[in-house]
Image (cartoon, rainbow, N blue to C red):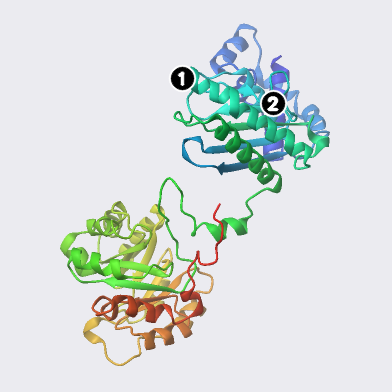
Amino acid sequence: MLTDAARREMQERIRAKGKPTKPTVSGTAKILNIHRDTLYTWLKEFNVDFDDICKQLPMKVLSETAEMPGKYTYLIGEALVGEGNEVAHIDLLMGDKDGPVGEAFAQGLSNLSMGHTPLLAVIRPNLPPKPHTLLVPKVTVNRFEDANKIFGPAQAAVAKAVADAVEEGIIPKEKVDDWVIICSVFMHPQASDYRKIYHYNYGATKLALKRALAKYPSLEKVFYDKDRAKHPIMGFRVPRLWRPPYLQISLDIPDLDKNKKIIAQIPRSDRIILEAGTPLIKRYGTRVISDLRDVAKDVFFIADLKTLDVGKVEVDLAYDETADAVIAAGLAPEETLNAFIHEAKRLGIYAVVDMLNVDDPIKKLKTLREFPDVVILHRGIDEESGRTIGLELIPELRKTFSDKRFLIAVAGGIVPETAKEALEKGADIIIVGRYITQSKDIERAVREFLELTPSMREDIDLFRVHVE
């Protein structure tokens, strides 16, 4: 019995890692479904050396494994269909009986869990579909009323969807005796309409099966939708910034109510970033970001900290108030910037370095251990004159750091004319303050910038007819 269990554990390790790996007492005990301490007791009682067993295995296991399929079928599907309390959410696994899905199927059916008792899906009593399907309730079932919903319309819906999927050719007929399905089913405790429960769970199961066989979603689909998606329960979208160009509006007026009024007049656009400017943060602290979220839940927010010291601490303060990005001063010591960038990336937000008054931005960037997500070419308010803002640095930055993925922003007295020139030279973000925030017609001022390029005029959801 022990030798067989060690052999099975070694086979699993070979399948997982592609090379012989010595079995362990813990892994073998798991195969035997006992605690490792129990196995140690047995070994001692019967005077068996586990290493002696292991020495007998390698050649035998390798020859047996060579006859096994190189890869088991392991398919994953998910779908949410319907609305209200009867909404259906299906997660499923589909694969070979003698593979990991089959093992999970057997374990689920033989190891019952209170409130989440697995059951075979049946079209009617005594008529399960093929492939055999194990239905597992996601929500704890602790009342007979809830059990009836699972053992009634949900069970029938899942079974019928599997049977129809085979008849319609979604599931290959030649695989019905080789595969099994594990289907996790959501059931709201307040769901009451049996017809809708059946209707939605049938549709969700059918869709999840199609997606599993199609290996949905593709990476292209994930990349396309990840910044467009809004989770229905969360209720807001969290954008990222890899679809430039963007218009960044700097809210520098140190008055919270005025800034809320400004935000209310800004037209909705996926190309807009909001910046909590330094004067605003100095007056209210980083908590002003959370306050502004009341009127701008879906917008990408940057905290202009102009960090010069204690980089990690300032990043943490802004992060706790839901900032999507933080700005440090390029004049800060190398050690401060390294800590600042590292902490921002660790927390999953953008690290931005503002090159205001930095004599040689390229030289400064070369000293950093990690590269920032955004580099700002900035002319300060007190030195604004003329229309040049170091735009010649844009192609030089691109060329020097061609192996890095980063965005270039330009700031300092930007008007539509200089913005257009900056975009033509390759800027990704145009940072505008007073031209918008002090305008008598804020919406018109914003649209002047959004009209500069075709891509800035196009909102993400403009041509989306259906959202899954």
Residue 249 image offset from top left, x and y in percent: 32, 72
Residue 127 image offset from top left, x and y in percent: 73, 22
Label 2 SS: loop
Viewer-proximal residue among 359 and 86: 86
Residue 94 lies, with reference to residue 442, above or below; the image says above
Mark whose residue sits in front, 1 or 2 = 2
Q: Quadrant of residue 65?
A: top right
Comes first in the chain, label 1 or label 2: 2
Residue 24 lies, with reference to residue 169, above or below; the image says above
Residue 206 lies, with reference to residue 258, above or below; the image says above
Q: CA distance from mark 1 to mark 2?
A: 24 Å
Give the residue pinned by disc 2: 123
Residue 161 image offset from top left, x and y in percent: 68, 35
Q: Which residue does the image show at 48% across and 83% down from the upper left?
A: 395
Q: Determine whether, in the image, residue 401 is placed left or right of residue 361.
A: right
Q: Can the viewer see residue 436? A: yes
Residue 120 image offset from top left, x and y in percent: 66, 23
On the rendered image, what quadrant is the N terminus found in? top right
The tag on residue 406 is none
Give the residue pinned by disc 1: 142
Q: In the current view of this chain or complex, which residue is farthest to the top?
A: 45
Label 1 SS: loop
Q: In the current view of this chain or complex, which residue is farthest to the bottom?
A: 386
CA neighbours of label 2 inside 10 A, class few (<14), some (14 to 19), many (20+): many
CA neighbours of label 1 inside 10 A, class few (<14), some (14 to 19), many (20+): few
Q: Which residue does the image show at 45% across and 61% down from the upper left?
A: 240
Q: Which residue does the image show at 64% across and 43% down from the upper left?
A: 207
Total numbered labels: 2
Mark 2 residue type: Ile
Q: Can the viewer see residue 72? A: no
Residue 27 lies, with reference to residue 251, above or below; the image says above
